[in-house]
Image (cartoon, rainbow, N blue to C red):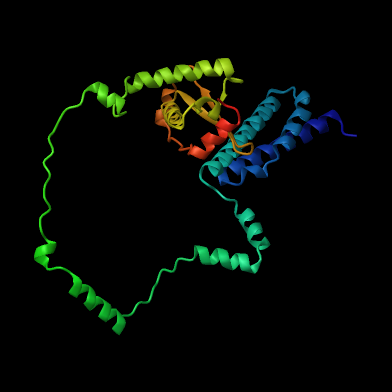
Amino acid sequence: MQSKREHIKAGRERLQRVIETCRSVEERSLDPFLIDVNEIIKIVREFFPEWEQPEDLCLDAEAINRLASVIRLQSEWVRHRSTSLYTDPFLLEEKIKKLDKEELVDAFIQAWHPMVELEQISLHSIAESLRYWESLPPLKDRWKELPIQQVESGSATREELIKQRILRDKAFTEELENFWNELKKFAVEKGENGKVGYWDFVGAETYDETVHRAFMTSFLVTYGYATLEIHPLEEETYIVPYEKQQRQTAKKQLVSIPIAITFEDWKKWRERGHT
């Protein structure tokens, strides 16, 4: 049975290995999922009660910090693949292996777009060309100037432009902030843990209004009024409003997250009882 001193020494060595492993993942751009997060947490939890010296506590804190960095990389890895139409090559390989020859040939033919094409002229083609040119009207008839229709110019009132949706009744900034306040109120009344389901918020009585609400939501995210929380495995998307506008988001490289708002999706949402 190990003595307390040997146990502490073994714990230091294991934490050091954890730190080195996490550092390798960060610095060498390795797959972050090579790290077993649960196993590392188990190791940290096992040895934490033994630490008495400040250097041991610092070692423990560094291990936790490195593990947090790995978890961040895992999150970025999942988000990248969920937002860039990424397909795992291993899944593709397995799918191709399961196809029979006929299905594989059919898929190849459908995707085949030859880059080189051989064409040659024949007597039949020459005869067709001559008949085409002989049937054309003279140039003087083909090049006649088209009559120009005179159209009187007019003016439109602001109310008419608003009715035609060329102008909005409110300034865009004012409309955006009102929409932000609506989101915050919705999150308090119907949300959970400060977030709301994407479709629960943007869904409306009509498809046009739903598209408009999704359009406004995209500006809330872009300008730092809110953020999106995506759970790709559960296929769920949530909107999290900020209490104050996050100005620093403008200094960072924005990530485009495409969310389809099709008429079919809207109909399915309505059929689920969201009226």
27 horizontally vs 218: left or right: right
Closest to the observer, 69 or 114: 114
Residue located at (30% from left, 82% from top): 124
Q: Quadrant of the N terminus?
A: top right
Q: Quadrant of the C terminus?
A: top right
Residue located at (52% from left, 30% from top): 228
Residue 209: percent from left, percent from top = 44, 28
Quadrant of res 167: top left
Residue 192: percent from left, percent from top = 61, 20
Residue 53, relative to residue 119: is it above or below?
A: above
Residue 50: percent from left, percent from top = 78, 25
Q: From this viewpoint, which residue is outermost toward the bottom?
A: 123
Residue 179: percent from left, percent from top = 43, 20
126 horizontally vs 77: left or right: left
Residue located at (55% from left, 48% from top): 86
Closest to the observer, 114 or 21: 114
Closest to the observer, 222 or 200: 200
